[in-house]
Image: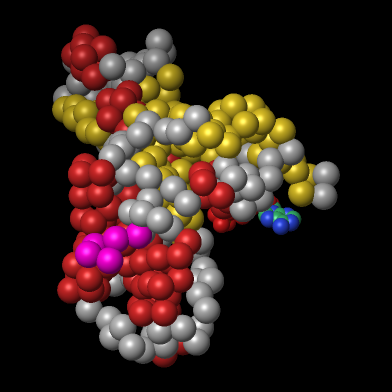
Amino acid sequence: MIKIEALSKSFEKESVLSEVKLNVRQGSIYGLLGSNGAGKTTLLKIIAGIIKADKGNVLIAGSEVFEQVSSKQRLIFIPDRSFFFQHYTIKQMADFYKEQYPTFSERRFLELKDVFNLDMKKKVHQFSKGMQRQVTLWLSLAAQPDVLILDEPFDGLDAVVRKKIKNLIVSDVAEREMTVMISSHNLREVEDLCDAVGILHKGEFVTQRDLDDLKSDVHKVQVAFRETKPQLFSDFTVLHKEKRGSVHLYIVKGNLMDIESHLATNNPLLSDVLPLTLEEIFIYEMEGIGYAMEHILE
Ligand SMILES: Nc1ncnc2c1ncn2[C@@H]1O[C@H](COP(=O)(O)OP(=O)(O)OP(=O)(O)O)[C@@H](O)[C@H]1O
């Protein structure tokens, strides 16, 4: 649904994105992760057609987006900061969205009124920051876009609202095959949401994978030996190792069965192989490319 080839962007001669390639399947949720200043917002804005790449292509359902009204009507980008007309009421905002997006559904808008429970006659500036964010999400979902692009969508929302919004996104993905891109630093929040993730660092992807593949490829091994520890995992890629008391901790790339049989041949006193959380995958992948993270996990 979203296809990007060899995309590059610089600001004032400083490269922000370099030869970026990306594929997001229709009806999937893609988590765009990365360090501060990695280029995530810039990439999302280019996909949304708000800024122009210096080089490369962005195609949404086979069509270009930049300066293409018909493509833009099928896509909504929600930035990390509110961009509202502060003196509009929700009702007036809904009328504005209706004009912009031919797919806007009055029925959906009214259905979602019960979910968000905000006074439609109030002006936007009379709402709190988190409530304003809810208004944007409410209107965007009512507009039924084919592609929804969210930059830090959960910032400032309480846990109940976050859960409601996640459910709404997932149901639109399942029912209408909406395609979603989410950039977030809150990895716990996006972990149960994303089908695929990409980690961006200094304008380049460090990794891009289906989340299930990524999780089945990296493991946390805790192992202890009765006496001397043998040389472990010399034929594997070890992203991280440390000693915690008598337990040795390894973060190892590789197939679960290969890891388990390697451990078995070394006769440990105890051993445990665990899947990593998305947060741990992020930290170790970044450590693997030399992004300093000492002490973060302690
Ligand atoms: N309009 C601009 N003019 C000049 N430089 C810019 C502009 N917008 C972004 N940049 C630079 O581009 C780089 C990437 O910024 P971007 O906002 O895309 O990063 P990000 O990954 O979203 O970061 P964060 O996670 O901190 O929000 C940064 O070095 C930033 O200073």
Q: Position of residue 115 (x, y in %)?
A: 20, 70
Helix, strand or loop for the magenta stretch, by majority: helix
Question: Residue at image x 50%, y 30%?
Answer: 62
Q: Position of residue 110 (x, y in %)?
A: 22, 70
126 vs 16, left or right, is left
Q: Is residue 14 magenta?
A: no
141 vs 49, left or right, is left
Identify which residue, 134 or 230, lies in the foreground: 134
243 vs 264, left or right, is right
| Residue 16 position by quadrant | top right
Question: Residue at image x 20%, y 21%?
Answer: 268
| Residue 102 position by quadrant | bottom left
| Residue 233 position by quadrant | top left
Question: Residue at image x 64%, y 47%?
Answer: 67
Identify which residue, 82 or 221, lies in the foreground: 82
Magenta-tinted stretch: 104-108
Above or below: residue 130 compared with residue 167: below
Above or below: residue 245 compared with residue 189: above
